[in-house]
Amino acid sequence: MLSYDSGVTKIHDYGLIGDCRATALISNYGSIDWLCWPRFDSPSIFAGILDRSKGGFWSIAPMEVRETTRRYVGDSNVLETEFHCSGGRATLTDLMPVAAEDFKRKNMLPAHELLRQLVCTDGEVEIRFDFEPRPSYGAKPACIRDMGPLGLRMHVGGGTYWLRSSVPLRIDEHGAHLRIVVKCGDSLQFSLSYAEESPAVLPMLGHRVEEAIRRSVAWWEEWAARSNYEGPYRHAVRRSALVLKLMAYAPSGAIIAAPTTSLPERIGDGLNWDYRFCWLRDASLTVRALLGLGYRDETEGFLTWLLHATRLTQPELRILYTVFGQLAPHEHELGHLSGYRDSPPVRVGNGAREQLQLDVYGEVIDASAQYGQFNGRFDRSTQKVLIGFGKYVAKNWDQPDEGIWEPRSGKSNHTHSRLLCWTALDRLLAMDDKGLLAGVPREWFARERDRIREQIQQRAWNDHLKSYVGAFDGDGMDATLLRIPWYGFEEAGSERMKSTYKKVCEQLSAGDGLLFRYKCEPSEGAFGICCFWAVEYLALAGRLQEAYRQLDSLLKFSNDLGLFAEEIDPGSGDALGNFPQAFTHIGLISAALTLAEQERGAGHPAIQTGDDVRASAGVKG
């Protein structure tokens, strides 16, 4: 029997809701332990996942529970939690309402709202309600005022929170509370809304909540149905797409890496980072995955945002930006929060904003090339920007950088960074061949591309190990080496790649299809996207049955809602790192797409940015 205060919630015991502007994490016991408004990287109002006593939370749950089961309603991001109790059952529905633009134009709606409805479906159940907000990451007290029929009001900075309830609540110095017995058919409804620059809209509860639930489910299911994917693992692929859509900031088109900060990659260690920003690499991989599923609008939105976000630094690219295209804030620590399971520090902002990561140019250009293949054209401004990125790569590719994994120990000549510089120039030449670009300096780009290829083949290959290695002239394995065939640099079935795959598995395997991204001491968790990269390598190498078996094994590490974190603890299977993680869900989608393409003999879209991409690079096939 679970009690109200049972233990520390594991990372994979959370579900995610949102409205493409902000998200909330909800535990399997009905507690909202993470919410930032009005956007992903705003200061939290609930941060109980990082410090239960100081961070704040909003819990609605029975006093005692035998078991909980959860599901998303259909293909939506509306979350249902069913509580099985000794005296009966109750269902909690959580959502941030979404609606079509036409509906929003004709109706007065809160700018930001979270709805919660609890319905007793059998017998009778004693419910405990605790609303304990802690604004600004728990640094400020919440002053709650009872405004009578309008509900409870809290002023925080320049904004105002309103909590409305279908039953009276008791206020004390900690927040608002309720203890109530509900019987079969009884319903409790609650609305938390936030207004900042516009007047607060406080619509009624009652039937409006039921209508908002139905309307939101229909909106999400209509979006999910736009996918043209008919390949294997459709349920997992569709859920991953819905997760990625939650991380897209609708007003700008930016896509964040994860909706959380400081969930640890090692419990009790300091590997805690703020991922609530748009990494160009992550976003490019995301739109490429969504484009493969048929979501062209998201790709257009990202490319539009990209042109805006990088306008002040073009042709240079920064590593990460806010959702409005500003440089991410400086990293600092919040010393008053203890961190998830006493794993400090809690960080906001991200120091990677100052790093040089040359691979990002290849990711952005490769994603653009695939979009160009679908769309058939780029406007003049986009062409100019893409060629400008290529010129930067042609001038700067032969220098060390921090690379994809963002170590804080200095720069190195990373094989993956060189591979993506090769990809950047290769794709630009391919787009020029297809008439998508005008003014490409072909001779220059081709010469530098070929120099990169020669350098990788000579300095990234370790003849003693019979394997490519993670950094030039070294001997360390890195899971990014599995991406070499994906970008069309070398065939997956080549002797070099077969030997490299074998060596990566020997040195980085964590068992059960799990892979570490590289070797480190003490060991961190297996890295989610790297595990899916191995599936893609097997598929590209024609080893489809192995790929299917490995993907089957990996899917069991999602939580009951189909969500993945950044990493997986190989011993316990527990989620580690920020959650849910776009990178991991990108990997799942991409692996399924590659399997589907190989099954129908269509080849890989990243390589098929043109048959001439590979031909011009001297790659057979």
Image (cartoon, rainbow, N blue to C red):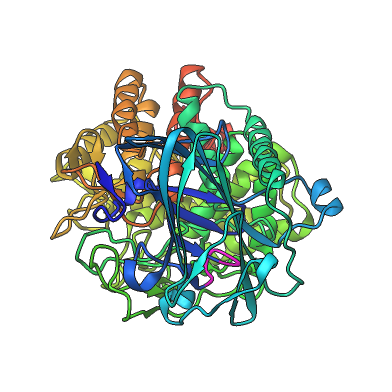
What residue is drawn where x is 74% and y is 40%?
376
- In this rendering, position of residue 459 left or right of residue 328: left
Instruction: Report x, y in % for residue 585.
Output: 44, 42
- In this rendering, position of residue 235 left or right of residue 65: right
What residue is drawn where x is 56% and y is 54%?
364
- In this rendering, position of residue 374 left or right of residue 317: right
Relative to 464, say whether 346 is above or below: below
Instruction: Report x, y in % for residue 353.
Output: 45, 73
The quarter of the image holding the N terminus is: top left
Magenta residues, dominant SS class: loop
What residue is drawn where x is 23% and y is 42%?
573
State the residue in front, 458 or 32.
32
Relative to 310, say whether 3 is above or below: above
Instruction: Report x, y in % for residue 496.
Output: 27, 36
First to last magenta residue range: 37-42
In this view of the protein, can residue 94 be seen by the observer?
A: yes
In this view of the protein, can residue 362 be seen by the observer?
A: no
What residue is drawn where x is 31% and y is 66%?
272
